Image (cartoon, rainbow, N blue to C red):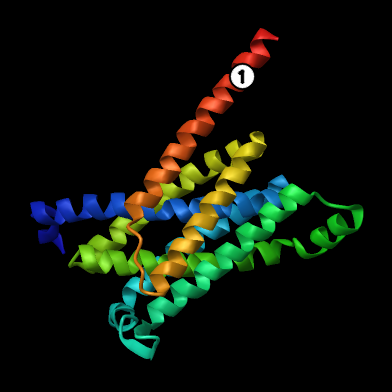
Amino acid sequence: MIELLYDPAVWASFLTLTVMEIVLGIDNIVFISVIINKLPPEQAERARRIGLALALIFRIVLLMFLAWIIGLKAEVFSLFGHAFSWRDLILLAGGIFLVYKATAEIHEEFEGETEEDEADRLSVTTFANIIGQIIVIDLVFSVDSIVTAIGMAEHVEVMIAAVIVAVAVMYVASGTISDFIKRHPTTKMLALSFLLLIGVSLVADGMGFHIPRGYIYAAIGFSVMVEAINILAGRNRKKKS
């Protein structure tokens, strides 16, 4: 264990894996930031903390079962010429869930709510309901994250350290992102579009069509830049008026 601290290759893999885990955690942060905004402020903060704590716990627990994680890539059944593994099925289910959730939220934003719809929404938008949704998506992203970690590092200690640092960064960033989405309603639609895009990519991965994450994050980065310009332009217009 101690000798790992003096190995430059270990430090290089740790830094690389930490950056990769932070990038993969962006999806997790966006989902949590959007979903907790339905709760009152005090409950939203609790949900954010619980959600990220669960993300850390799931990742560490899964790392402890490396043999099982590796086994997730083993073929379960074959359909239409594609061999499906448990990892594929988990990503497929998570992607479908994200597509459904993002589509439902976008529909709600465009259509608006009647008083009856609002009452129905409030009756099901409970703290436990939100935590349940966070648990589902945390589990999906954790599997994807840990499979990536196994492919990039050799030592479990390095993987756990990288995951802890990445989740700590996610915790710090998630509050800022959540507050920003709440202050700027138009960014919620952008975030929902990201979730839709990520959901489609997970479904594609589960079906055996891998979409390089670099393309997805480049599209997200460009969209964020355009939205930032719109927000700054809006502020300037308000100042002039």
State left or right for residue 11 relative to residue 77.
Answer: left
Point out the image quarter for the N terminus. bottom left
Q: How many marks?
A: 1
Point out the image quarter for the C terminus. top right
Q: Position of residue 212 (x, y in %)?
A: 32, 57
Q: Position of residue 41 (x, y in %)?
A: 70, 45
Residue at 34% of width from left, 86% of height from top? 81
Q: Secondary structure at mark 1?
A: helix
State left or right for residue 38 relative to residue 206.
Answer: right
Q: Give the residue at the far right of this rendering.
A: 115
User: Which image quadrant for residue 219?
Assistant: top left
Q: In this figure, which residue is indicated by the disc labeled 1?
A: 235
User: The disc labelled 1 sits on which kind of residue?
Assistant: Arg
Depicted 71 relative to depicted 117: above or below: below
Depicted 222 relative to depicted 37: above or below: above
Q: Position of residue 93 (x, y in %)?
A: 51, 74
Q: Position of residue 208 (x, y in %)?
A: 36, 74
Residue 39 visible in the picture:
no
Residue at 46% of width from left, 76% of height from top? 90
Residue at 84% of width from left, 62% of height from top? 120
